[in-house]
Image (cartoon, rainbow, N blue to C red):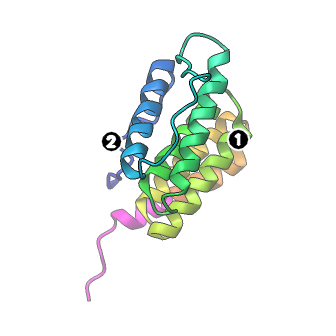
């Protein structure tokens, strides 16, 4: 029996531009609520680019996601917004089939989650599963298999009853 993790309720499969735009907007709202309001506004010569209208929008989406990650990094390594931002950026790269860039974001998220919760936490297993799926798409099955074995071992330990003392 698998114990649900915090990531089970999150829909990380954001394939449509509308979902990606919504995610970015949500992350930016959260970030603005968590940071001091001393940030400079955008110069008037750089109006926000609407998302979902063409190929040039992808660089705008990437720029916004990278800016969100950078701002979240300033909040500290344990901040949940950083993990969420890394997931969004990884999903963006995965959708564009930029697997090496996506893998780098999953590795960062994995490292942060292991530091925060330990290497055997069910949330670490969720990241491992997602990262393994990416590696399978990237035609790296042996690496994906190793991650899945580790994730399965974590989930098996977390679902077993605690030993009696």
Q: Is residue 152 visible?
A: yes
Q: Is residue 58 magenta?
A: no
SS of the residue under disc 1: helix
Q: Is residue 119 visible?
A: no
Residue at (63, 50) in percent of width and height: 145
User: Quadrant where the N terminus lies?
Assistant: bottom left
Determine whether, in the image, residue 33 is placed left or right of residue 153.
Answer: left
Q: Which mark is residue 9?
A: 2
Q: Along the line of sight, which residue is nearer the eye, 75 or 92?
A: 75
Q: Is residue 2 above or below residue 100?
A: below
Could you tell me if the residues under marks 1 and 2 are in contact, i.e. CB atoms within 8 Å? no
Q: Which residues are magenta?
A: 152-165
SS of the residue under disc 2: loop
Q: Is residue 41 above or below residue 53?
A: below
Looking at the image, tell me whether mark 1 or mark 2 is earlier in sequence order. 2
Q: CA distance from mark 1 to mark 2?
A: 25 Å
| Residue 77 in the image, given as x and y percentages of width and height | 52, 62
Residue at (63, 33) in percent of width and height: 63
User: Going by the picture, which residue comes out furthest to the bottom?
Assistant: 165
Q: Is residue 80 above or below residue 30?
A: below
Residue at (41, 67) in percent of width and height: 157
Residue at (36, 44) in percent of width and height: 8
Q: Along the line of sight, which residue is nearer the eye, 38 or 86?
A: 38
Of discs 1 and 2, which sits in the foreground? Answer: 1
| Residue 105 in the image, given as x and y percentages of width and height | 62, 47
Return the residue at label 1.
101
User: Going by the picture, which residue comes out furthest to the left?
Assistant: 164
Q: Along the line of sight, which residue is nearer the eye, 9 or 29?
A: 29
Q: Is residue 135 above or below residue 160?
A: above
């Amino acid at each position: 029996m698998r114990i649900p993790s915090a990531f089970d309720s999150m829909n990380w499969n954001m394939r449509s531009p509308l979902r990606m735009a919504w995610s970015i907007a949500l992350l930016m709202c959260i970030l603005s609520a968590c940071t001091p309001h001393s940030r400079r506004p955008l110069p008037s010569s750089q109006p926000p680019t609407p998302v979902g209208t063409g190929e040039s929008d992808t660089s705008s989406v990437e720029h916004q996601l990278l800016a969100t990650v950078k701002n979240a990094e300033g909040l500290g390594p344990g901040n949940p917004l950083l993990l969420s931002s890394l997931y969004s950026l990884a999903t963006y790269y995965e959708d564009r089939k930029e697997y090496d860039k996506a893998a780098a974001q999953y590795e960062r998220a994995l490292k942060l989650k292991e530091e925060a919760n330990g290497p055997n936490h069910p949330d670490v297993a969720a990241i491992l599963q997602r990262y393994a799926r990416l590696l399978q798409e990237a035609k790296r099955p042996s690496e994906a298999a190793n991650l899945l074995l580790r994730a399965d071992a974590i989930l098996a330990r977390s679902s077993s009853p605690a030993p009696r003392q």
